[in-house]
Image (cartoon, grey):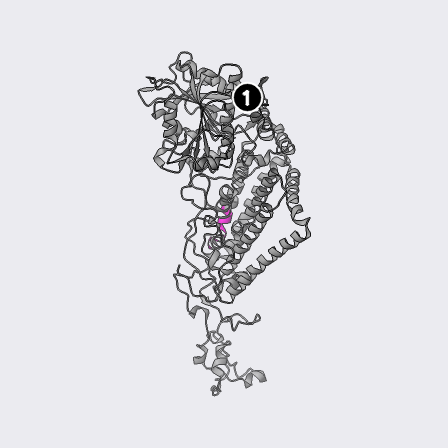
């Protein structure tokens, strides 16, 4: 990398004074003309965003404080030294009463003295100068020119040093006032629903849980005196090493950093995090602190698994929140942008913050995509079809065939009701539904209602009866087929498993020819990160109190929980780009879907949390639906189950364990990537990989992967071949809305999916 020479610099004339620490740091920090990158991570690449939180391609230069060299460090100006003043001889004095006397000869050394102070102009003879001044020799005009002027000093190389943007003080102050005005609007939007009693926060319970969890961690470190001393010593050594490292850099020495960010951590990709000593110190201090904090949790012994996971989660939230990249005065890119725009970025950002709180009805609903670019039915969920049936809880969509003949056995998709079904039909290039239709399958999908208070008492059993059971009846009547393939995604797969166990108990399971599970759990002992919020009775009761207010759990609350599970990907990058940079997010279909959340009826959600996450009744054979005790071993339907290796919601280990609990044949596949990208992985993308092998049994999923076969690309063709072998018989294509008794109600995607929370 090209770097500027190490030379002290001072603020350019007209700019506001900079913090002493920043100016001091900049004297040793070479700078680079490299723009930062906007960060976004997650399960898929974000167009134009490929990192964490370091900012966008703003074209803003790294920090440098002026274009004039300051005095050398070896001879600093005294703190009391006056700023350079205008040359007095340049003014037009009043005409003297008598001509001035000739200048006296200049004694040795007077030239140097004149260069260090303002030139002296002799007063008119009618004015008697002080004795001390009279004794002082008068400077010659030629010697006045030797006075150093900031604008005449050598400038650093333009390719390696950068000027501080000129700040218009008046405009800056005006924008700060505008920012505060928008901040008042944001505060009012936050407070209004609370003052009206529409929102009742329970921070005490949340704080109590955090304090209790951290208390258990610190108990381990503090109850043994030797261990406590060793901990404190290691902390002290870490900070002393950092301080010594910084002092060496300030002294002009080359000193390697003691803490380096992970190469994948884009928060510190701006070059000034390394080239500027001030920001480098902040970065390393943060990294040292965060690693010490994580060490406290990871190395604490005697913690039960639930407490350890909660402590790890809470610690990560604290560590992520205090990152210097999240604040204007500790992030070089944000500071440059704020100075260059005269704080216009903060005005835009605060306006967006107010809008997002208003959109969330008092809760912050972080915009992750430019939602104005998308519309369900226009450029999302556009695979042609018809709504052929509906009830209070769902619409049933049948898709228009694209082949002259289709497989005799249709496919019924049961999506999660926590999200909307069109994750499987985002656009033609990513649509799993279109892939099935184009390969000759008659596809039906459930589109769940976005419930309100009128559906508060709809139970889990109601969702089963009015969802997959009723949809299965309609599918078989419309197609005339004796059975159907079924597919469940996430909690939709859990519901499908419960439905099959119920049908097996009442001897009608033959209507299901096969079942496919996408990242679906039936055993929750090793459930994903959601167990952090559902692991004890007090947490469940707190959720139930929230649902009791309106009869449902707000979709935004669930979305925020999912976001904070990956806060460095889905929260802080957007807080920085939206509210500190004032930038509109890029349009991204996956993140639009992620923000299009749904509400959950109180009765249904309470049953699900208690029986699955809290008590794990389904895998224990203790779950009851309508008086029927469910047993997964009685499910003899052939099952194709897909886990994703990096899934944090339905971990591969949990899905693997659950797959061993079914009584029939199981084809277990582990796909690369995570909960979304590992599933929505069309063959044309040629991304990731998948593993196939023997039926799951006692070992863990990583051991299974080691003895399995790895295949490049998408698992979709493998699944399609598996489905076809059950019934390769083909029949003429079925046109939606033509079956007797089931006319088309409306075009796909229907109206239920368009209701926003």
Give residue 513's quadrant in the image. top left
Residue furthest out toward the top = 740
Residue 648 in picture, x, y percent from top left: 51, 37
Query: From what the image shows, is residue 748 above or below residue 255?
Result: above
Residue 576: in sight, yes or no? yes
Residue 297 in picture, x, y percent from top left: 59, 46
Query: From what the image shows, is residue 241 above or below residue 733?
Result: below
Label 1: few (<14), some (14–19) or many (≥20) C-alpha neighbours in 10 Å: many
Please state, as top left, top right, bottom left or bottom right, where the N terminus lies in the image: bottom left
Q: Give the residue pinned by disc 1.
A: 631
Report the front residue among 310 and 170.
310
Report the front residue among 262 and 634.
634
Residue 693 in picture, x, y percent from top left: 42, 31
Residue 651: in sight, yes or no? no
Report the front residue among 92 and 737.
737
Residue 54 in picture, x, y percent from top left: 47, 49
Residue furthest out toward the left = 404
Question: Which region shows up in magenta?
Answer: 340-348
- Label 1 sits on a secondary structure element that is loop
Q: For the image shown, how many numbered marks are present on the structure?
A: 1
Query: From what the image shows, is residue 215 above or below residue 113?
Result: above
Give residue 684's quadrant in the image. top left
Magenta stretch: helix, strand or loop mostly: helix
Report the front residue among 747 and 530.
530
Give residue 551's quadrant in the image. top right
Magenta span has 308?
Answer: no
Answer with left or right where residue 688 lies relative to residue 555.
left
């Amino acid at each position: 990398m090209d770097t500027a020479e190490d030379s002290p610099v001072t603020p350019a004339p007209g700019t506001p004074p900079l913090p002493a620490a920043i100016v001091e740091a900049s004297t040793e920090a070479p700078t680079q003309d490299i723009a930062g990158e906007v960060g976004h991570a997650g399960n898929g690449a974000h167009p134009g965003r490929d990192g964490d939180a370091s900012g966008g391609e703003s074209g803003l230069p790294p920090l440098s404080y002026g274009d004039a060299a300051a005095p050398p460090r070896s001879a600093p100006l005294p703190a009391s030294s006056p700023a350079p003043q205008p040359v007095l001889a340049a003014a037009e004095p009043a005409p003297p009463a008598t001509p001035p006397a000739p200048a006296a000869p200049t004694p040795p050394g007077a030239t140097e003295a004149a260069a260090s102070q303002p030139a002296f102009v002799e007063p008119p003879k009618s004015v008697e100068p002080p004795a001390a001044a009279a004794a002082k020799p008068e400077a010659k005009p030629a010697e006045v020119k030797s006075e150093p002027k900031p604008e005449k000093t050598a400038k650093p190389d333009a390719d390696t040093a950068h000027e501080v943007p000129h700040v218009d003080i008046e405009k800056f102050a005006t924008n700060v006032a505008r920012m505060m005005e928008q901040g008042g609007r944001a505060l009012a939007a936050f407070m209004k629903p609370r003052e009206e009693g529409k929102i009742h926060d329970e921070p005490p319970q949340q704080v109590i849980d955090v304090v209790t969890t951290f208390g258990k961690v610190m108990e381990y470190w503090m109850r043994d005196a030797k261990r406590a001393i060793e901990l404190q010593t290691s902390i002290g050594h870490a900070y002393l090493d950092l301080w010594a490292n910084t002092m060496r850099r300030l002294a002009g020495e080359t000193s390697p950093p003691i803490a380096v960010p992970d190469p994948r951590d884009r928060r510190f990709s701006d070059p000034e995090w390394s080239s500027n000593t001030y920001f480098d110190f902040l970065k390393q201090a943060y990294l040292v602190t965060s690693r010490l904090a994580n060490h406290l949790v990871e190395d604490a012994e005697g913690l039960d698994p639930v407490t350890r996971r909660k402590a790890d989660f809470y610690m990560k939230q604290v560590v992520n929140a205090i990152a210097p990249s999240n604040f204007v005065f500790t992030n070089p890119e944000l500071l440059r942008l704020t100075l260059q725009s005269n704080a216009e970025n903060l005005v835009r950002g605060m306006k967006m913050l107010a809008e997002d709180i208003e959109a969330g009805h008092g809760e912050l609903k972080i915009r992750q995509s430019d939602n104005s670019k998308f519309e369900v039915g226009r450029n999302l969920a556009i695979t042609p079809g018809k709504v052929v049936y509906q009830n209070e809880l769902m619409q049933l969509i049948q898709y228009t065939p694209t082949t002259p003949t289709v497989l005799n056995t249709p496919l019924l998709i049961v999506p999660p009701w926590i999200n909307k079904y069109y994750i499987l039909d985002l656009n033609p290039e990513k649509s799993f539904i279109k892939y099935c239709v184009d390969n000759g399958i008659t596809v039906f999908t459930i589109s769940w209602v976005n419930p309100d208070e009128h559906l508060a008492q709809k139970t889990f059993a109601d969702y089963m009866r009015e969802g997959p059971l009723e949809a299965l009846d309609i599918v078989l009547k419309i197609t005339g087929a004796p059975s159907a393939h079924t597919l469940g995604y996430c909690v939709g797969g859990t519901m499908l498993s419960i439905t099959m166990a119920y049908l097996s108990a009442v001897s009608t399971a033959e209507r299901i020819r096969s079942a496919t599970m996408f990242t679906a759990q039936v055993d929750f002992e090793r459930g994903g990160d959601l167990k952090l919020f559902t692991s004890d009775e007090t947490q469940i009761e707190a959720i139930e109190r929230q649902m009791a207010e309106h009869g449902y759990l707000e979709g935004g609350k669930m979305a925020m929980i999912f976001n904070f599970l990956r806060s460095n990907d889905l929260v802080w990058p957007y807080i920085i780009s939206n509210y500190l940079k004032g930038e509109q997010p890029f349009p991204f279909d996956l993140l639009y879907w992620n923000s299009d959340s749904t509400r959950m009826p109180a009765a249904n959600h309470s049953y699900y949390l208690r029986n699955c996450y809290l008590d794990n009744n389904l895998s224990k054979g203790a779950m009851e639906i309508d008086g029927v005790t469910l047993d997964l071993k009685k499910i003899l339907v052939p099952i194709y189950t897909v886990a994703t290796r990096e899934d944090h919601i339905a971990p591969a280990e949990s899905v693997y364990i659950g797959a061993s609990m079914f009584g029939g044949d199981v084809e277990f596949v582990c796909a690369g990537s995570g909960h979304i990208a590992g599933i929505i992985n069309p063959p044309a993308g040629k991304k990731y990989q998948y593993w196939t092998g023997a039926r799951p049994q006692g070992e863990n999923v990583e051991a299974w992967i080691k003895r399995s076969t790895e295949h490049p690309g998408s698992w979709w063709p493998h699944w399609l071949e598996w489905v076809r072998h059950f019934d390769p018989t083909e029949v003429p294509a079925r046109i939606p809305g033509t079956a007797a008794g089931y006319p088309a109600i409306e075009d796909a995607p229907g109206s239920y999916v368009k209701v926003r929370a």
